[in-house]
Each structure stands twice: as C-alpha cells, then as structure tokens.
Amino acid sequence: MAAPDTQAPAPRRGKGGPGHRLRVLRTERLTPHLVRVVLGGPGIDGVVDNGFTDKYVKLAFPRPGVAYPTPFDVAAIREAMPREDWPIVRTYTIRALDHAAGEMAIDFVVHGDTGVAGPWALAAAPGDEITLMGPGGAYAPSPEADAHVLVGDEAALPAIAAALERVAPGVPVHAYVQVDGPDDELPLPTAGDLTLRWLHRDAGEDLVATVRAAAWPAGTVHAFVHGETGDVKALRGHLLDERGLDRAWLSISGYWRRGVDEDTFQAEKRAPVR
C-alpha cells in the first residue's frame, strides 16, 4: 500500500508576520494536571484549519519586566529588540478549532508554578490575550490504513484525542497513554474500534515496555508516537526494526526530555549535529 496522504486541504501559512492575537473566553480544569483554555476574538479568523489532527501553534509569552511595542508583533520584536528580550515561545497542539463558534481550545499540562505556559493557563481569565503563530502540522489518521496505533503522554494527549475523533467507524485503533495516575484519565471518544491502555506513572507502569509487549494489529498500520524523547527514541527502533513498520507510516517526535527544562531542550534541538 502506498504511503499515507497527509496533504492538508488548506495551504500552510508562511513563517513570520505579526501572528494571531486571541482572547481568553473561558478555562476548564479537565484533570489535576490538565487545563483547557478556550480562545476566541477577531484574531481567530486568520487561523487556518490545515486539516491535520496534530496541528500546532507557537504561543508567544511576554518576558516579565520587558516593555513591548504595540501591536505585539513577534517578527518585528525579533528584528528590533535584543534576543534576551524576545518573547518566550512554546509549542502547543490545538485540541479543537471551531470557526463557526469562533473558538479554539488548547489543553495545557500544569504542574503548579513550574514553567511558563502552565502557570499562564492556571491564571488565565476571560479577556486575557495571547499571540500565536501557525498552525503547522503533518499528521492525520490515514483513511487508507487498516489500523492505527497512537502512543504518547500528557503532552501528546490533545493530538491523540483529536486523532481518535478522526478514525473511521469500526477501524481498529490501539492507544497507549501515560499519565501520572487514574485522576488524569480523560474520556477519549472515537467511532473506531478502540483498545485503550492508560499507563500510570505513579504506579511504575512503563510506556515503552507496554508497547513492546502489546499485540500488534493486522494489516497496514498508521502509527503516531509522540512524547518524552527517551521513550520516543526507544520506540522508534522497536517499531521500524522489530515491528517492520514502514517509515512513511510513522509520525514520531520528541516533545520534551526528562530532566531538562524547555529552553534547554529547544536549544539542544536547534544545535547543529556534529
């Protein structure tokens, strides 16, 4: 079978420009470690639905104590201001985009006052504003696949949930999601024939070991594997070498690295390979 067609129905937006200025409409605490922020306002009209289920945006957070020009144009700021004053940028998956309702939902993993985006989401109130760039993306469950495998943790959960909503009725789909504990589980509706395994970090349940030991669906499998870089690296070799998965049918990426903060992780990713 040919590689999955992941072309989006709408063209991608180029990099640069002022971004989209959106306003907080409401927030919802989904689990102890997951907060949904629903955004809207006139700026949402410029956010293109690119057709991917892992469509992601870059959120720009002002640095405390830095005065920025109005309007808040990230590209212009980077041209005119020193790097240490540039906004802090974080990447997040769009959980849902509904232009008819004028709403976009983004789910944030939160751990108290740790990080930048999580504390912002916890404190967000209606009327607060945020600038975002994008979206980008490259994956949606292929209707040509015989089955789907989705693997990830809290960071990948929005993309996994969106993918499950796109799986065709009755198509086998196996999902493996690692969270801290039972209170962090969420309903994951799908029309597909879902086999769902929650892995609880607090109980020592290992994502990589579970996927390695799991039964593999028959036929052409389209897989989505995103999350902690060490886990993703271990699973890449397993899926390609041991399961015999065609690379064209695998969407795989590390979102974060255990023991490393976000800024260090992003700097490592940008560093040239020697």
Image (cartoon, rainbow, N blue to C red):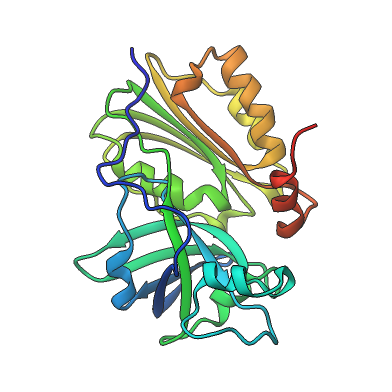
Q: Is residue 184 above or below residue 176?
A: below
- How far from the left and from the top, in percent, is residue 143? 27, 29
Quarter of the image where one finds residue 192? top left
Instruction: Point out the image quarter for the N terminus.
Output: top left
Residue at x 61% of width, y 78% of height: 62
- With 101 as the anchor, is 156 left or right in this view? right
The residue closer to the viewer here, 254 or 204, is: 254
The residue closer to the viewer here, 150 or 96, is: 96
Quarter of the image where one finds residue 211? top right
- With 110 as the anchor, is 106 left or right in this view? left
Q: Is residue 186 above or below residue 105?
A: above
Residue at x 32% of width, y 35% of height: 7
Residue at x 61% of width, y 68% of height: 78
- How far from the left and from the top, in percent, is residue 110? 61, 67
Instruction: Point out the image quarter for the C terminus.
Output: top right
Q: Is residue 171 above or below residue 111?
A: above
Q: Is residue 257 visible?
A: yes
- How far from the left and from the top, in percent, is residue 112? 68, 73
- How far from the left and from the top, in percent, is residue 59? 52, 66
